[in-house]
Image (spheres, helix red, strand yellow):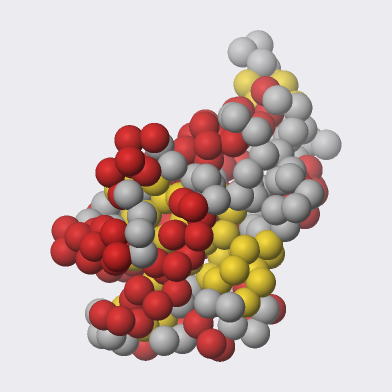
Amino acid sequence: MASHSLLNTKEAAQFLRVSEASIRRWSNAGLLEAQRVGRRRERRFAPADLRRFLESAPRGPRPPAPDLVAVNVGGAAVPLRTHLAPIYSSDAGMLRLSVPFLADGLRSGQPCFLVAGGPLLERYTNALVDEGIDVAAAQDSGRLVTTPGPGSDVADAISSWEGLFGKALAGGPTVLRVIGEMVSERLVFGSEAAMMAYEEAYELMAKRFPVVTLCQYDAREFDGQIMLRALKSHPDMFELHMGGFLN
């Protein structure tokens, strides 16, 4: 293949919507085919190889245990590598799916991640305590990780998640659970456009891990255009017929 048709590391990262660090890590591990060119032996990637890498995404880097193939979300058995966008319009609606989802994971010893800040985080903490969860102990043990946002830009956020997921899986196969309150994430990213670009990149990255993610949208805070784009960036909502997740 002619060298001018190959992509460099930055272009390959843009193609896959991940960080450049991820591209280098996957290349070093032999997961992503790369060619070396020039005197500096720089990496170059064929678009066809990148597309094949995308198509292999559901296999992931580490399979879950055989009995950990789905989790309960609002009474529905949701398979791993599912990325959902529950929409709610009340404070009670915000907690209806998310708190039992986190509480079940924490009781099972599964790593849980909560993206929320300020009053939202306090609301979650109080609700988890009401569910009988020792939130402080869960945080101290690393089973519950809370943050107002995964990163200041898309590349930083994706790289951060890959690091967190990799660390959580270092001890062996397990299920990962993520709740993202998008009102909090919008504040961190600084704009809705950047937030949605992140959502689209996360959709690709998360398919490589045994994770179930609920990106929660407050209908009182986002307009119809953002809601439509949110649904488009969460195709699992349609494939799994998750209309019941609209609170």
Residue at the front extreme, as displayed: 132
Question: 72 or 237: nearer the eye?
Answer: 72
Asked if 166 appears above or below 246 in the picture, the reply is above
The part of the image, by quadrant, that contains residue 13 is top right
Give left or right: position of 228 versus 223: right
- Residue 213 placed where, x, y %? 52, 61
In the picture provided, is 91 more to the left or to the right than 56?
Answer: left
> Is residue 92 positioned above or below 196 on the image?
below
Q: Is residue 184 visible?
A: no
Q: Quadrant of the N terminus?
A: top right
Is 212 placed left or right of 148 in the picture? right
Is residue 26 among the parts visible in the rendering? yes
Return the x and y of residue 199 as percentages of the image width and height: 46, 62
Determine the residue positioned at 69% across, 78% down.
Answer: 239
The vertical placement of 213 against 3, above or below, is: below
Residue located 34% across and 76% down the image:
94
Q: Position of residue 160 (x, y in %)?
A: 43, 39
Percent position of residue 164, x then y: 47, 38
Residue at 46% across, 51% down: 106
User: Which residue, as the protein is rendered here, is positioned at the far top?
Assistant: 39
